[in-house]
């Protein structure tokens, strides 16, 4: 089963889905450090991430048409804007995927 992983972070959710037998068609994350973490694990030869195509991109502007068919879309959209740690800026927080501040 082909998977599209959005808001991938360091890849934790994707790792679990890979262990469950799903294969990522694309892994999309806008935070450079998170993408670097996944890519570093690829260079270390970590088997679950070897086949991942990591895209340092905004989920709102990513070209989904290039992926072909995927059976599952997964992801962990940012929750910080709505948490106590995020100071409750909500939709005014640039980390919110619906924010115009992006």
Image (tube, rainbow, N blue to C red):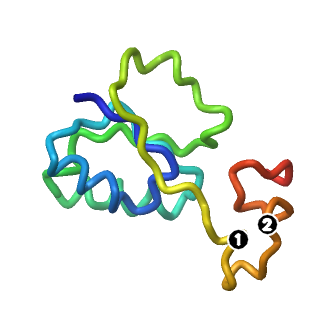
The residue lying at 65 percent from left, 71 percent from top is: 80
At which x and y percent is residue 91? 81, 59
At which x and y percent is residue 52? 30, 41
Which element is circle 2 on? helix
Per the model, the C-alpha gap separating discs 2 and 1 is 5 Å
How crowded pointer 2 is (Cα within 10 Å; few <14, some 14-19, many 20+) is rated as some
Residue pointed to by mark 2: 90
Q: Is residue 81 left or right of residue 40?
A: right
Q: Which part of the image, by quadrant, shows the N terminus?
A: top left
Mark drawn on residue 95? none
Location of residue 39 (image quadrant): bottom left
Whether residue 73 is situated above or below residue 82 in the rendered picture: above
At which x and y percent is residue 100? 85, 48
Of 12 and 44, nearer the camera is 12
Whether residue 86 is situated above or below residue 29 in the rendered picture: below
Question: Answer yes or no: do the residues labelled 2 and 1 have beta carbons within 8 Å?
Answer: yes
The residue lying at 17 percent from left, 57 percent from top is: 46
The residue lying at 70 percent from left, 61 percent from top is: 95
How crowded pointer 1 is (Cα within 10 Å; few <14, some 14-19, many 20+) is rated as some
Count how many numbered circles sit on residues in the image: 2
Whether residue 75 is situated above or below residue 79 in the rendered picture: above
Residue pointed to by mark 1: 82
């Amino acid at each position: 089963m082909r998977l599209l992983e959005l808001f991938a972070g360091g890849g934790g959710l994707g790792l679990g889905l890979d262990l469950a037998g799903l294969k990522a068609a694309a892994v999309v994350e806008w935070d450079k450090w998170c993408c670097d973490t996944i890519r570093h694990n690829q260079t270390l030869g970590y088997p679950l991430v070897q086949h991942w195509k990591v895209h340092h991109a905004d989920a709102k502007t990513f070209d989904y048409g290039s992926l072909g068919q995927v059976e599952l879309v997964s992801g962990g959209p940012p929750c910080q804007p709505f948490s106590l740690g995020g100071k409750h800026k909500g939709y005014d927080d640039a980390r919110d995927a619906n924010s115009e501040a992006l």
